[in-house]
Image: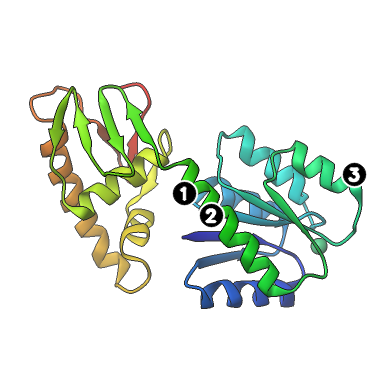
Amino acid sequence: MRILVVEDEEALALRIKRVLESENYHVEVAFDGDSGVELALTETYDLLILDILLPGLSGIQILKEVRREGLSMPVLLLTSKNRVEDKVAGLDAGADDYLTKPFALPELLARVRSLLRRTSEATSAVLVVGDLEVNTSSHAVIRAGKAIDLTAKEYAILEFLLYNKNRVLSRLSIAEHIWGDNFDLFTMTNFVDVHIKNLRKKLDDGRDKQLIQTVRGVGYIIKDTL
Ligand code: CA
């Protein structure tokens, strides 16, 4: 699970990072709004934690940009002021929850867990692109009514691409998602290519157009329109 923290109080940002990492989340930190929004829109995260008052774009502006781009990951806002209008503006902009500073780190962890659980329940469903159906509970993969047998790694890559449909995923971000930080990721990107090749063999059998498209020099994408 990858989490982005955008918080300009560096000491607090690093404490949040440490406590989340102790729970095995992969955490990246930005200390201002502009680098925060850039990361949020170019990398793939399962959850965003955004301070509202930031140098550059505010947390609420970042949130609006993220939602405008169609990204639906849960967003937790941090506010230093117990101001009703901040909360209302945040929730209107599509925040899922907020915490008022100062807060205890276990409280933050509890919110993060609950937000991530909510998404995994909400997304435990059938993903459909064209004639492909993927059941994220049973892991059944069906194309044009025909069941396709995938290995666990192939399935994980396909599901990751489908959850990020219409976005290009780099080989590195796929490797990181599948293998975590425990491997030499630059080596693992070669395994990504091998798995993609095998996936294509199974998914595209006898078709002209590839389901998983290569974006040269960048990575892979599954588009809504096949
Ligand atoms: Ca701040």
Cα distance between the residues tagged 1 and 3: 30 Å
Give left or right: position of 17 versus 204.
right
| Quarter in which the C terminus is drawn | top left
Marking on residue 116:
2
Asked if the residues shown at circle 1 and circle 2 are in contact, with their CB atoms under 8 angstroms apart, the answer is: yes
Disc 3 marks which amino acid? Glu
Where is residue 15? Give x, y as percent. 67, 77
Where is residue 192? Give x, y as percent. 24, 54
Q: Look at the picture and state if 164 lies above or below 8.
A: above
Asked if the residues shown at circle 3 and circle 2 are in contact, with their CB atoms under 8 angstroms apart, the answer is: no
Callout 1 crowding tier (Cα within 10 Å): few <14, some 14–19, many ≥20: few
User: Which element carries disc 3, helix, strand or loop?
Assistant: helix
Give left or right: position of 174 versus 78.
left
Q: Residue at x 54, y 49 (%)?
A: 118
Residue holding disc 3: 85
Q: Earlier in the sequence, mark 1 or mark 3?
A: 3
Disc 1 marks which amino acid? Ser
User: Which element carries disc 1, helix, strand or loop?
Assistant: helix
